[in-house]
Image: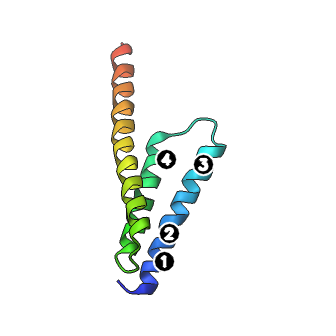
């Protein structure tokens, strides 16, 4: 990956983080699947950009951020599936 492409990929990841943060601060109710998916994709994009312009501190931060977002995304998807299943069980 060229340095220019790495910068573009990193900027897209940063934009996703900023958008998710803004969404979390203005939404009346947060869709945790959307929020965590945006954070996970943002972290992955920033980690990809760090493969060209490596920075240890940023790598550790993005790896932790991505891990938290990934785990939280799985939990949110499981909760959503359980809620949908509960609704199916209630309906005749």
Q: Give the residue number, with chain letter if any, for mark 4.
A: 35
Q: Would you say the residues marked 3 and 4 are in contact, meaning their CB atoms lie under 8 Å apart? A: yes
Q: Earlier in the sequence, mark 1 or mark 4?
A: 1
What's the CA distance linking mark 1 and mark 2? 6 Å
Relative depth, front residue between 32 and 54: 54
Label 2 residue SS: helix
Label 1 residue SS: helix
What's the CA distance linking mark 3 and mark 4? 8 Å
Q: Give the residue number, with chain letter if any, for mark 3.
A: 23
Q: Give the residue number, with chain letter if any, for mark 2.
A: 12
Residue at 66% x, 44% y is 26
What's the CA distance linking mark 3 and mark 1? 22 Å
Q: Would you say the residues marked 1 and 2 are in contact, meaning their CB atoms lie under 8 Å apart? A: yes
Q: Give the residue number, with chain letter if any, for mark 1.
A: 8
Count up the numbered dots. Answer: 4
Q: Earlier in the sequence, mark 3 or mark 4?
A: 3
Q: How crowded is mark 1: few (under 14 residues within 10 Å), some or many (20 or more)?
A: some
Residue at 36% x, 71% y is 48
In this picture, residue 47 sits left or right of residue 20: left
What's the CA distance linking mark 1 and mark 4? 22 Å
What's the CA distance linking mark 4 and mark 2? 16 Å
- Quarter that holds the N terminus: bottom left
What's the CA distance linking mark 2 and mark 3? 16 Å
């Amino acid at each position: 990956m060229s340095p220019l492409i790495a910068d573009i990929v990193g900027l897209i990841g940063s934009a996703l983080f900023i958008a998710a943060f803004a969404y979390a601060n203005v939404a009346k109710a947060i869709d945790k699947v959307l929020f965590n998916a945006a954070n996970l994709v943002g972290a992955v994009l920033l980690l990809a950009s760090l493969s060209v312009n490596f920075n240890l501190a940023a790598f550790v931060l993005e790896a932790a951020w991505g891990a938290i977002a990934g785990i939280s995304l799985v939990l949110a998807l499981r909760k959503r599936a359980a809620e949908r299943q509960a609704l199916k069980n209630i309906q005749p």
